[in-house]
Image: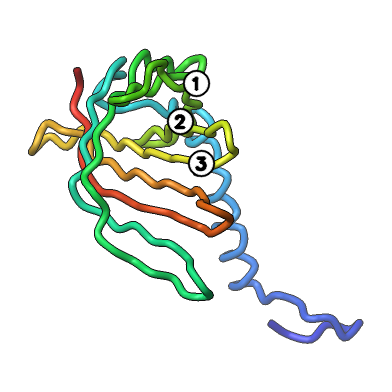
Amino acid sequence: MRVGRSGAMVPTGEENDMRCATALGFSFLSAVLCWADPVLAQGEPKDLLCSFTSGTASSYENGVFKTKPAAPLSFEIADIDLDHQTARLITDGREKPGGLKVVRALNANHFLEVANEGFLNLTTVYDKDPTTGTHPAVHSRHLGVLGEPVFAQYAGFCTEK
């Protein structure tokens, strides 16, 4: 950079070339991402059985966060419709399946449940791992009990039903 006649900083030729190359690179990347179809690379499963065996649960009590290991968790994500961005959540002990919203991403799909109380549960299912034949997944819960925050995060896998 150099100081111009007006006192403003002016890029040198080399710096200007670098800015142009960077802008061109971002333009190309934007074009690729616009045309990319964010779906599961190995296909689009319609039903997934998900099992989470490790994780942590935390609560906030009396001004302090407390963390402990989370109990194992499993459920089914059924009737996955990526075009309409919907799915159903089937859990043991629940008479009626819950509705899920789907947010599509590159190499993953996010399944969002908004509970009647407004609390959020989010499950991210990644593309199938060719080594294990399963989909790595992460599940997060955000809720409150008696006005105190309670949240949990799990790691696990989903398999195609």
Tag nearer the camera, 2 or 1: 1
Secondary structure found at label 3: strand
Which residue is the site of mark 3?
A: 120
Residue 115 or residue 79, whichever sits in front: 115
* Location of residue 64 in the rendering, given as x and y in whole percent from the top left corner: 47, 75
Mark 3 surroundings within 10 Å by alpha-carbon count, few (fewer than 14), some (14 through 19), many (20 or more): some
* Location of residue 98 in the rendering, given as x and y in whole percent from the top left corner: 45, 22
Colouring of the image:
rainbow
Q: Of the numbered discs in the image, which one, if any, rests on residue 12?
A: none
Pointer 2 with pointer 1, Cβ within 8 A: yes
The amino acid marked with disc number 1 is Gln
Label 3 – label 2 distance at C-alpha: 17 Å
Residue 125 or residue 147, whichever sits in front: 147
In the rendered structure, the answer to whether residue 25 lies left or right of residue 39 reads: right
Q: Quadrant of residue 134?
A: top left
Q: Of the numbered discs in the image, which one, if any, rests on residue 85?
A: 1
Disc 3 or 2, which lies upstream in sequence? 2
Give the residue displayed 51% in from the left and 15% down from the top: 84
Which residue is the site of mark 2?
A: 104
Secondary structure found at label 1: loop
Disc 2 or 1, which lies upstream in sequence? 1
Looking at the rendered image, the quarter that the N terminus falls into is: bottom right
The amino acid marked with disc number 2 is Arg
* Location of residue 46 in the rendering, given as x and y in whole percent from the top left corner: 31, 15
Give the residue displayed 46% in from the left and 55% down from the top: 150
Disc 1 or 3, which lies upstream in sequence? 1
Vertical arrangement, residue 54 with respect to residue 156, above or below: below
The amino acid marked with disc number 3 is Leu
